Amino acid sequence: VWDPATQSWVANPALDTNQGTESGVENTTCSASATTSGYQNNASGSGNAYGWRNFVAGTGSSAFGSSNSTSGPFSNAFGYLNIATGTASNAFGYKNDASGNMGSAFGYMGEASGTGSIVLSGWYGLNGDGVWNPGETSTASGAGSVAVGAAVSASGEAASAVGVGSKASADYGTAIGGFNTANGMLSSAVGYTNTANGWGSSTFGAFNVANAQYSSAFGYASHADNIGSTAIGYMAVADRDYAVAVGRTGGEQQIIHLADGTQATDAVNLRQLQAGNAGALAAANAYTDAQVGQAAGAALGAAKDYADAGDAATLDAANAYTDAKVGQAAGAVLDAA
């Protein structure tokens, strides 16, 4: 309590600080069921404090090590400078903070503030200066979120961030690897420096971006910018809805080792296309030959009929002429006789 006479905090004379079980030096217990052991530990509410200057206030909570603090009921803190304030929370390691109910923080300076969240953290210097800086703490602030690694953050509900510098900011998002970001609900970013912005989007590889709803980008530096689009390979760009791209404008690429299509909506490879073209050409040639043959036959028949008619007329004329001449000659002979 505050003592106006001395202008300082002093022990509350009305509070018995030796109610429980104590062993060591300058330990205090504020309830009969509390236990302390070591140096300058304090426990109340059936709590347990063991080590050096640990503070336990939560019912059924425990602190082991040095300068740990538990104020949440049934919470636990082990190590150095850990804090467990949430109900049934746990903080283990160095300077971890478990403030979310049922939250757990393990390792180095992790923060589990979401209900039921879990942090398992190390440290990585993002700017390379060799010392801890703001933003290099691993955090799990979303309910049921999981953050594992160094400088990772899972802020969405049931989100997961694993690796180094990866962030899952949307509900049910997943970021795994180095510096990946899952901003879209139900999105996934796996690999290195991938970004999944769209709802239900996915990125795998390195430097890929999936911006649109249901879009996917796989490979290296590929972009899926339209709804339901998929970009595959090296710097592919899918810029049409529900389309698949293996290249980009000015950077087209081939799809190789493609089996023959068997269904109406299957892709056709070059072999099938050439065979189809050859069959179509053969059919066209046969049809052309047949049509030409029929036309030629008709023309020849007409010519023959015309020639035959001409020959008959010529023969008739010749016969008539001959008959006339023969008649004339016979008449002359008869006259002379």
Image (cartoon, helix red, strand yellow):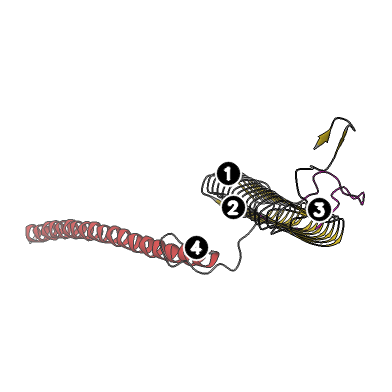
Q: Nearer the viewer, mark 3 or mark 2?
A: 3
Left or right: residue 217 compared with residue 120? left
Indicate which disc, 1 or 2, sits on the residue closer to the N terminus.
2
Percent position of residue 247, x then y:
64, 52
Q: Residue furthest front?
A: 14
For residue 263, say whether it is visible.
yes
Q: Nearer the viewer, mark 1 or mark 2?
A: 2
Badge 4 element: loop
Q: Residue furthest top?
A: 4
Residue visible at 79% across and 45% down in the picture: 135
Circles 4 and 3: CB distance less than 8 Å?
no
Q: CA distance from mark 1 to mark 4?
A: 29 Å
Q: Name the chief secondary structure element in magenta.
A: loop
Q: Nearer the viewer, residue 149 or 291?
A: 149
Residue stretch in magenta: 118-137
Write down the residue under mark 2: 158
Badge 1 element: loop
Residue visible at 88% across and 30% down in the picture: 5
- Vertical order, 159 against 21 (above or below): above
Could you tell me the amino acid type at mark 4?
Val
Could you tell me the amino acid type at mark 2?
Ala
Q: Nearer the viewer, residue 71 or 225?
A: 71
Per the rendering, the mark at residue 268 is 4
Write down the residue under mark 3: 95
- Residue 231 in magenta stretch: no
Indicate which disc, 3 or 2, sits on the residue closer to the N terminus.
3
Residue visible at 43% across and 68% down in the picture: 262
Mark 1 packing: few (<14 Cα in 10 Å), some, or many (20+)? many
